[in-house]
Amino acid sequence: MAAKMKATVFVEPGRIALEDKPVPDVGPNDALMRITTTTICGTDVHIVKGEYPVAKGLTIGHEPVGVIEKLGANVQGYAEGQRVVAGAICPSGHSNACLDGLHSQDGQGGKHGLKPLGGWRFGNTIDGTQAEYVLVPDAMANLSPVPDGLTDEQVLMCPDIMSTGFAGAESGNIRIGDTVAVFAQGPIGLCATAGAKLKGATTIIGIDTVLERLEIARKMGADHTIDFNNVDPVDEIMRITDGRGVDVAIEALGLQQTFEACLRVLKPGGTLSSLGVYSGDLTLPLDGFLAGLGDHKIVTSLCPGGKERMRRLMNVIAGGRVDLEPLVTHRYKLDDIEAAYELFSNQRDGVLKVAITP
């Protein structure tokens, strides 16, 4: 009889349940990871609400930290018992997109609308990480050893939040001396703020409506913070920049309103770096878009994954360049995951990220 494990399963829109599932069989190129810590993402909330379609009975979650329980016959260079992370996006390493250097666009993900949504597999097209075990496909492309001396919570942001937030700064091509605005200081926006500082931006403006988040934004590198509730952020950013506008505006919420605000604060020739996941059509305002004549760039990013990306992000943490532990505000056992979802999806009690431990 197959061994069983606890797993958080999508039942139907509005409902998840903790169920017993068989521990996965390990194929030749796979690894079985015993989860030691995972977390809940805003995308998981979209799934639970039925706003992003996944199969009923799927184990959700895509942010794993754990220990190698079992290795497939072909997997080399790893040892059972080794502490590892795997990215939320787990590329195969051999698709056209991977061989073209675009690992996140692996093309093995699920369908969202008409296009494949990149290499996002965990909790999307295969069973995910809010469980006692997860099967990591193409293990040699995806497992990255955790450096000695780093805790689970220190590296918990690497699989998704840190990788995505940093990608916003990287795709925006921030240069030393740039002025950058980051719209929304949730976990991804806070990582984008930290990434902008690491990339060399010297004036960073963080925008949000939650004062506690604006305080953390300053710790992450924001030089100015703007409370969306009190002032028009576009007017305030133009005042801070003496009417020049920003070199890069990062959109980290996924709303028409914030996308438009990003466009309106750009300097001529500036870059809008979009990280938000949008749930409807976006429109470009004629004036904000300067009728298409502003030399603007609009770039989008999907969380980069794969073991080399994870290695680099953990190096940033091990080197003391950024501390993301303050983003973990709450801790729950896997048995209490429904309560954790209730807290996180309603953004109660100052929650940023919740650490889930089996």
Image (spheres, rainbow, N blue to C red):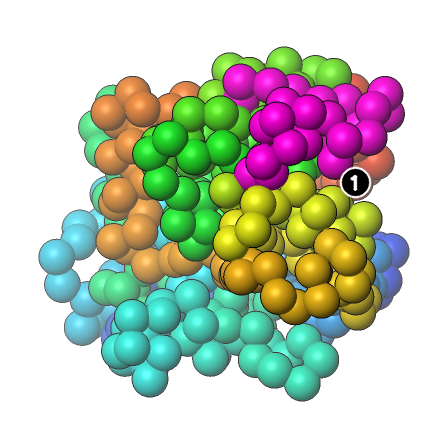
Give the vertical position of 221 relative to 82 (above or below). above
Front position in the image: 358 or 240: 240
Give the vertical position of 346 relative to 100 (above or below). above
Amino acid type at circle 1 is Ser
Which residue does the image show at 52% across and 27% down from the upper left? Answer: 204
The percent position of residue 87, horizontal first and vertical second, equals 41, 53
Residue 315 shown left or right of residue 19 in the figure:
left
Quadrant housing residue 216: top right
Q: Can the viewer see residue 238?
A: yes
Q: Which residues are magenta?
A: 222-246
- Whether residue 236 appears in magenta in the rendering, the answer is yes
Which residue does the image show at 56% across and 59% down from the upper left? Answer: 296
The number of discs equals: 1
User: Which residue is under mark 1?
Assistant: 345
- Whether residue 241 appears in magenta in the rendering, the answer is yes
Front position in the image: 159 or 77: 159
Give the vertical position of 337 relative to 308 (above or below). above
Residue 326 shown left or right of residue 58 in the figure:
left
Which residue does the image show at 17% across and 54% down from the upper left? Answer: 78
Front position in the image: 110 or 27: 110
The percent position of residue 224, horizontal first and vertical second, equals 60, 19
Q: Secondary structure at mark 1?
A: helix
